[in-house]
Amino acid sequence: MSLSARATLKKAFVVLGAVLLVLYLFVSRSLWFPDLERQVKTGRDRLSKDIDLSHAQIITWKIKGDDWRYTGECRVALILDRISDVPSKAYQKESMALKIKMDAYAVTCEPTSKGTTIEGIRAPRLIRNWYFLTDSPLSPDARIWESWGEKVELGLCGVQRYPWEDTFIVLEIVRPDPVLAKANPKLEVGGDYDYAVFEHITPLRIFRDSVLLLLGLCVLGLAYVAIKQI
């Protein structure tokens, strides 16, 4: 083999090695902070349903197993728009007129030999523990989460969700609130995640991408120097 052919072959190996290393760095991007990225994905995977708070009623929200793939502990909240027609006092638990009771259950879906599913047993799914102490979440003694911003998010309950079942979230309006009915009220359900993750994920992503970009440039620079010396 001639010297020029050997030089060409060496250059090809250097280029191939550099390309493979850059591809590896690109693929490894998804391996940084996998738990935090999973939390972000969970936090954004939500379902919502418009409701009417102007009169007493029982609202049953059916979430089919195929409608939402999330399984595990999930949280249900009341979402209200902050609008000028509604005084700020009306959003506060201590002074709002609205009184509700929460419940949740599931009906299992059993697959058949024909490829269809049939309804099975009914099981309670409302979580009652040290945090979710009551089924009246807007009462003054209910100490669960609230979030205030452009919208007001008032925590209602926790629900356990398992595969192969339909979830039913039941909201009973014991005392309606015509004032909050103007605030575009919605029920929202989302997975259990750390709310602080959204504060930390952006700088961590910038750090990750900066490191990977620097390493990629170093690989390309070393490959360029190696080719020049061949």
Image (cartoon, helix red, strand yellow):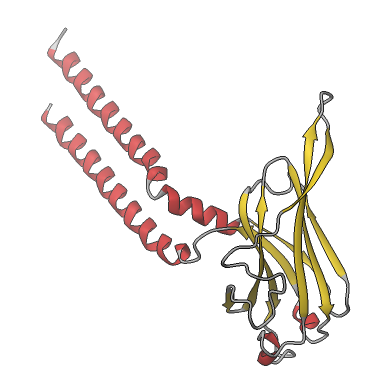
Front-most of residues 121 and 171: 121
Task: Look at the image and tell me in which quarter the C terminus lies.
Answer: top left
Q: Residue at x 15, y 36 (%)?
A: 225
Where's residue 189, x and y in %? 67, 61
| Labels in figure, total | 0
Where's residue 14, x and y in %? 22, 27
Where's residue 151, x and y in %? 64, 77
28 in relation to 214, above or below = above
Judge left or right: residue 141 versus residue 212: right
Task: Look at the image and tell me in which quarter the N terminus lies.
Answer: top left
Q: Residue at x 86, y 68 (%)?
A: 58
Front-most of residues 167 and 89: 167
Identity of the residue furthest to the top in this view: 1
Where's residue 200, x and y in %? 40, 64
67 in relation to 5, above or below = below
Judge left or right: residue 40 versus residue 52: left
Q: Quadrant of residue 100?
A: bottom right
Judge left or right: residue 11 versus residue 29: left
67 in relation to 51, above or below = above
Q: Quadrant of residue 190?
A: bottom right
